Amino acid sequence: MPRNLPSPNPGSLSGSARNPVAASVGRIALGLCAGLLLGLCAGLPDQLRAEEDSTLRVIRHRGEEAMVPLTRSWAEAYRTVDPGVVIKVQGGDARTGIAGVINGHAEVVSTSLLLLPREEALVRKRTGQEPVMVPVGRDRLAVVVHADNPLPETDFAGLAGIFGEQGTIRTWGQLGVEVPGCREGKIAVYGGPPGSGSREYFATRVLGTGGELRCDLVVLGHDLWVVAEVARDPCGIAFSGAGEVMGGIRELPLARPEVGETSPPAGSTAGEYPLTRPLFVIALGTATAEVRRYLDWLQTPDAQELVRRAGFLPWVTETGGEPVGLPAPPVDPAPVAPP
C-alpha cells in the first residue's frame, strides 16, 4: 500500500520538534508549494508583456518537470539577450513535452529522453521536417536508502533484483544486512510516475529494453517527494535526480557494469558515474530564426552556467566538445504534410 507523507499537526508544534524527518518533510512540502507559486508568477509578467505588445515574438518552451526550474532560469536570462522575444515556459512529463513539438503546441522541448522511432515518424508525418536534438547538459540519477541502512554498495544486478518485476531480491536480509527500524526486513521501492524521464531512463539502463519495474513500486509525482519518503521509511530505496538528495538518506555507490569497479556517488563527474543521462532540447530542423538563435544561446557559457547552478552538469564543459547547434535550414523547405 502506498505510504502517505506525514501531515503537520495544526494544533501543536511539538510533534515536528520530536520528529526531525517529519519536520523536514513539512519544509519540503511548503517549499514545493512555494516553488510552484513562484514558477507560475515568474511566467506571468512575460505572458502579459506578450499579450500587450504584439511586436514581441513568443517561443513556447515545454520541459519535463525536473528541468522546469532550469528552463525558467533560461527564460529569465534570455530577456536580456533578446528583449524582443518572450520564452513561455510550461512543464509536464517528458513524453507530453515531446508530443507538444509533434502537435505544434511548442517550438522547443527540454527532455532527458531520446525520441522513440514512432515519435520521429510522427514529426515527419505531421510537419514534413526532421526533429533535431541539441545536447545542453547531463544529469545523474542517485540510488538512495535511509540514512540508517548499512548496505555499503550495490551494482546493476542488485538493482535489477530489487526494482525489476522479474527480480528476486525482496528483503534486506538477502543482501546480508539488517536495517534498524525496518521490522519485517521487506524492501520498499519508490520512484517517479510513468512518463517521467528519470523512471524511463532508470528502467532502460538497469533492466534493459522492455524491462519492467515492480508493480508494487510506490509512485510519487516528484523526486523531492520520493527522497522525502525514503528519509521517513527505513525499509525504503529509490532512484531520483542527484540534485534532490537531502538529509535523512544516503546515496549508494554503484559498481560500473563495464569495468566491475565501484564508482563514487552521484556527485562525481559524469564520466565516472554509471547512471548519467544527457539532457536535450528538441526542435524542428527548419525552426524560425528566433528559435535558432535561442537554441544557439543555450550552449553559450552564460546558459551553461545556469545548467550548473540548477544542479546538472554542463554539456560543453563535461564533454570537452564544441557546441552542437541546429543544422543550416534548407533553401527551399519541404512543404508541411497534413496530419
Image (spheres, rainbow, N blue to C red):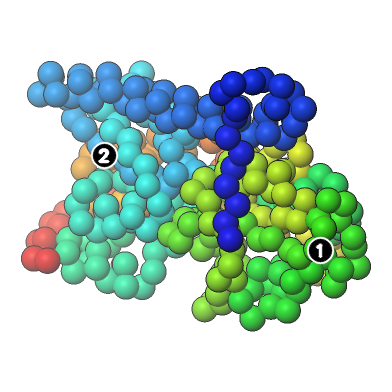
> What's the amino acid at mark 2?
Arg
Dot 1 falls on a residue whose secondary structure is loop
Which corner quadrant of the image does residue 154 belong to? bottom right
Q: Which residue is mark 1?
A: 185
The 10 Å Cα crowd at callout 1, few under 14, some 14 to 19, many 20 or more, is: some
| On-image quarter of the C terminus | bottom left
> What's the amino acid at mark 1?
Gly
Asked whether, in this view, residue 48 is left or right of residue 91, the answer is left
Asked whether, in this view, residue 41 is left or right of residue 181, the answer is left
Q: In percent of the image, x 18 and y 69: which residue is there?
A: 125
Q: Which residue is mark 2?
A: 60
Q: In percent of the image, x 21 and y 32: which residue is there?
A: 58
Query: Gap between marks 2 and 1, in whole Å?
Result: 48 Å
Q: In percent of the image, x 39 and y 64: which residue is there?
A: 115
Dot 2 falls on a residue whose secondary structure is strand
Nearest to the observer: residue 174 or residue 2: 2
Q: In percent of the image, x 10 and y 24: which residue is there?
A: 54
